[in-house]
Image (cartoon, rainbow, N blue to C red):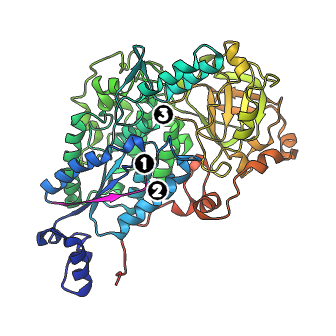
Amino acid sequence: MSLRSDAWYSGDDRNAYMHRAWMRRGVPGSAFEGRPQIAIANTASDLTPCNSHLTEVAASVRNGIYEAGGIPLELPVVSLGETQVRPTAMLWRNMAAMSTEEMLRANPIDGVVLLGGCDKTIPSLLMAAASVDLPAVVVPGGPMLTGTFRGTPLGCGTDVWRLSEEVRAGTLSQEDFLRSESATIRSKGHCNTMGTASTMGLLAEALGTVLPGTAGTPAPDSRLLEAAHDTGRLAVEMVAAGRRPSDVLTRASFHNAIVALAAIGGSTNAVVHLLAIAGRLGIDLTLDDVDRIGSRVPLLVDLLPAGRFLMDDLHRAGGLLAVLREVRDLLDPSAITVTGKPLVEYLDSAQIWDPEVIRTREAPLLPEGGIAVLRGNLAPRGAVIKPAAASPHLLRHRGRAVVFDSIEDFHARVDDPGLDVDANSVMVLRGCGPKGYPGMPEVSNMPLPKKLLEAGVRDVVRVCDGRMSGTAYGTVVLHVAPEAAAGGPLALVRDGDWIELDVPGRRLSIDIPDDELAAREPSAVAAASYAAPSRGWEKLYVDHVLQADTGADLDFLVGSSGDQVSRESH
């Protein structure tokens, strides 16, 4: 079998000598003689707490690779901790993807196992793998176990938003709120709600890039290590078979991921990530595809923030494969997985063990669970909303705009008793898109004004060009494109304008004649808050980032470059 790594290690010239000698360090000579070199791209970091256990997972992957005859090589790659980095982890998703792609291409490896968990890590790894197109397989790090406070389960993220609003409303003391802090995070692993981390782990399996049956296994569960070992073995087999991401990640696999996204009630952030991954493969996936394929798929998983349960409940109830079995007729049967077999072949033995957590097709949590794509004169290139996490009475709504020109403006005025806002208002926040913030932060689920909370209001329509956490809830229209900082009409909205939301009709509009809207000048106050970096990654990002409707990748990273390196290093 001819291996890519032979271009480094095979031969008796000076370059081959150097490549082998510097890697030998106790490794037997047979390591360089026809044995696949498998990188373990590891996003473990103490500053990415959701991924800190991945070094343990990597050890099991290493054992599996070696057992199958490969040579395991751990490769630390950029790690992004959603809860830690400022201004937002999304600012560096593309950087993480680019750096991982370049390291995979530059090094003498034949395949890679991708270890991710926290929100941006799995998307960035899949973007990198798609661009370099070496045999690649994902091991999702898995969710944490459920914590409890006063006998009540806590959904990390979702209950932070809920409890913090109750403090502001005066129905929960600050002391009790802080007392719940140590109970929220019970174990290693990522968020236990259907946030972005959980969503992307499950969608990585729906895409076919995970050993079937693995995604959603809780991080502390010993079966995750067993699956990691088996994945290491699989990576060696994939190299032998020449099975690459371009074979697995097809239009059919994205179709299945969109169906899965709806059925599990997944995060709106998945839309941006799926579009970006597809862009690296040259697949023309659009927002219209997301709406057409997924918007009317039934919601089957009763999980926070759209339902009641948490991720370890989903795992014990049968996991993703049990969910997909219920919507098998909606899947594209031609999509294969990293094993070379079609995804649908793994559904025959899947069962629902708890129909309260995973609903049957005949008794869904909601008849339509997918992401809805809105268009109109306020979002010419589209915006998205998650109806399952919204208030039903607000899905058709007309209200006066209350406009905030930046996140700082919002924080300064939201609790002002004189703020002209009521339960029918539409809160508008701009300057939070990819270019404007920069990086498209998770600020779209704006906390409600204190005066509304005290009056018992718990949801109003909110519109923003940023994102929201997958753990969040509410009637939030987000990813508005083009963003205000890119000349989008959101920059033209004024206080008191009438905003119309019609989710069933897929419309988001401002009730102003087109010629009057076009004659308006963009808000100078908002423009003054837009990012204007002078150097470094932030400048590169702002100068080249695309809009949310195409995945917010950098323009020069769309597409792939393959794995070839033509020149020697010495």
Disc 2 element:
helix
Asked whether disc 3 touches disc 2, contact meaning CB atoms under 8 Å apart, the reply is no
**Image point (48%, 20%), residue name:** 367
Looking at the image, is mark 2 or mark 1 earlier in the sequence? 2
Instruction: Indicate the quadrant containing the N terminus: top left, top right, bottom left or bottom right.
Output: bottom left
Instruction: Indicate the quadrant containing the C terminus: top left, top right, bottom left or bottom right.
Output: bottom left
**Which residue is labeled 3 in the image?**
294
Disc 1 element:
helix
Looking at the image, is mark 1 or mark 3 earlier in the sequence? 1
**Which residue is labeled 2 in the image?**
96
Q: Nearer the viewer, residue 262 or 233?
A: 233
Label 2 crowd (10 A; few <14 / some 14-19 / many >=20): many
Q: Is residue 45 above or below residue 188?
A: below
Examine the image and state in which quarter residue 312 appears: top left
Residue extending farthest bottom: 13
Residue 282: tell me if it is visible: no
**Image point (52%, 24%), residue name:** 178
Return the x and y of residue 453 as percentages of the image width and height.
67, 17
Q: Which mark is residue 121?
A: 1
Instruction: Check if residue 73 falls in the magenta segment.
Output: yes
As drawn, is 115 to the left or to the right of 393?
A: left
As drawn, is 452 to the left or to the right of 444?
A: right
Return the x and y of residue 439 as percentages of the image width and height.
60, 49
Nearer the observer, disc 1 or disc 3? 1
As drawn, is 378 to the left or to the right of 128?
A: right
Asked whether disc 2 touches disc 1, contact meaning CB atoms under 8 Å apart, the reply is yes
- Give me the C-alpha separation between circle 1 and circle 3: 24 Å
Label 1 crowd (10 A; few <14 / some 14-19 / many >=20): many
**Image point (73%, 26%), residue name:** 415
Q: Which residues are magenta?
A: 70-78
- Give me the C-alpha separation between circle 2 and circle 1: 8 Å
